[in-house]
Amino acid sequence: MEHDEFIGQVQARARLDSRGAAETATRATLETLGERIPEGLAPNLGAQLPIEIGRHLEQDRTERFELDEFWRRVTERERPGVEFPDAAFHSRAVVSVVAEAITGSGVDRLKDALTPEWEPLFEFPFEP
């Protein structure tokens, strides 16, 4: 999947008003996810995404935090005025596009790196 197609799909699924907003939602989601997943997984998954997008997964630190904290961090990283429920919806849209873009067992490895409480992140579509 190419960069423009990826961002276009995020924009459509997340119902965002611009490609810039889709870029921001993608960056916020993947940077935050990169802080949570094991270091070795980030480059593997990132290599299957467009370069400009996959690099957001590669962070300097890995932490253990729960799904609510993930969504709180995504909310902080998104545009001013984006509320928590909208940021959670956007992140689900981003992850749904990631799931389609990566091959093989990538999604299973991602899910295995997280606790079962993270399953709602992979549930899309739903109404915000």
Image: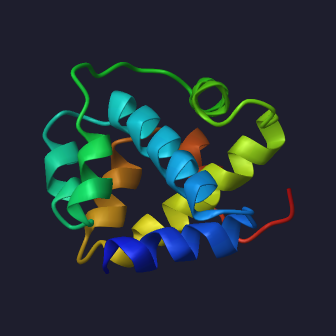
Q: Residue at x 74, y 63 (%)?
A: 17
Q: Residue at x 57, y 48 (%)?
A: 25
Residue 92, percent across and down?
62, 57
In this rendering, the answer to whether 48 lies above or below 53 is below
Query: Could you tell whether 49 is left or right of 125 in the image?
Result: left
> What colour scheme has been applied to the protein in the rendered image?
rainbow
Q: Is residue 122 visible?
A: no
Q: Residue at x 25, y 19 (%)?
A: 61
In this rendering, the answer to whether 22 lies above or below 82 is below
Query: Could you tell whether 1 is left or right of 15 in the image?
Result: left
Q: Is residue 66 visible?
A: yes
- Total marks placed: 0
Residue 81, percent across and down?
81, 32
Which corner quadrant of the image does residue 69 belong to? Answer: top right
Quadrant housing the N terminus:
bottom left
Q: Residue furthest right?
A: 127
Residue 21, percent across and down?
62, 53
Which corner quadrant of the image does residue 18 belong to? Answer: bottom right
Query: Could you tell whether 7 is left or right of 90 in the image?
Result: left
Q: Residue at x 36, y 28 (%)?
A: 35
Looking at the picture, tell me which residue is in the foreground, 65 or 90: 90
In this rendering, the answer to whether 35 lies above or below 85 is above
Residue 128, percent across and down?
85, 56
